[in-house]
Amino acid sequence: MNGTTGAGGQGKSVRVLLAEDQGMMRGALALLLGMEPDLEVVAQVGSGDEVVSAALEQRPDVALLDIEMPGLSGLEAAALLRDHLPGCRVVMVTTFGRPGYLRRAMDAGAAGFVVKDGPVEELAEAVRRVLRGETVIDPALAAAALSAGPNPLTGRERDALNASADGATVADIAVRLRLSESTVRNYLSAAIGKTSTRNRMEAVREARRQGWL
């Protein structure tokens, strides 16, 4: 690549990976970001499963990840990037401005969290800012996350809810998670109580709405 002299140098110096499952949105973002004089989209992927391999091949400076994608979620991909390519800064770009997602994104090592309805100039500036070592968070989402408080579900309670989302029986979930059926029931009961719902399917919906799953 020509012009690797830093964000203030000549040529397109900031290498960007873009992960977005909607092809039209991905193409539009790539085109618009590519018009910025100091940015270059070096990889585009449509599923979370492709993020790490593309990043290891192209070595981007910044990865822009959608949260909800086929295969791995953007949150899961962010955690893997932190392990496999720690020098790559991650910005979550999503239509789902849920407080729980923000906390999980930060836990996964993301340096930024912005929503898609903002102008592309703000996204480009977010790329530059995280590359300078800053943390960039949508202000409205940050305020909502502070008021919402932490995710009340434990890791195992989240596992049990996720495993039950497809209608699996307690026995099926127990096998999948390698737990006893009584333990699974306890986790599901706790999750139902914490989400103030009546059953596990309602608990799944509420946890997803809050961004806890």
Image (cartoon, rainbow, N blue to C red):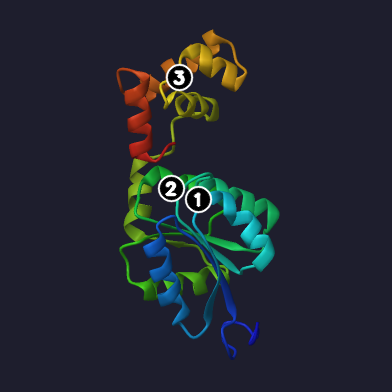
Q: On the image, which quarter does residue 43 sit in?
A: bottom right
Quadrant assignment for the C terminus: top left
Secondary structure, mark 3, is: loop
Q: Residue at x 41, y 42 (%)?
A: 100
> Which numbered marker is on residue 24?
none
Q: Is residue 6 above or below residue 83?
A: below
C-alpha separation, residue under disc 2 versus residue under disc 1: 6 Å
Q: Is residue 110 above or below residue 24?
A: above
- Which mark, residue 74? 1
Please state the horizontal and vertical placement of residue 2, each as a whole percent of the image: 64, 86
- Residue closest to the eye, 2 or 13: 2
Q: Amino acid at mark 3?
A: Ala
Q: Amino acid at mark 2?
A: Glu
Task: Name which residue lies at 63% across and 55% down.
Answer: 52
Residue 16 pos. (x, y %): 55, 70
- Alpha-carbon span between mark 3 and mark 2: 22 Å
Q: Check the picture and name the quadrant holding the N terminus.
A: bottom right
Query: Is residue 160 visible in this depiction of the protein?
Result: yes
Front-lying residue, 203 or 103: 203
Eyeballing the image, is 122 above or below 148? Answer: below
Earlier residue among tags 2 and 1: 2
Name which residue type carries label 1: Gly
Total residue callouts: 3
Q: Are marks 2 and 1 in contact (CB under 8 Å)?
A: yes
Residue to which mark 2 is pinned: 68
- Residue receiving disc 3: 168
Q: Is label 2 in a helix, a strand or a loop?
A: loop
Under tag 1, what secondary structure? Answer: helix
- Marks 1 and 3: CB-CB under 8 Å? no
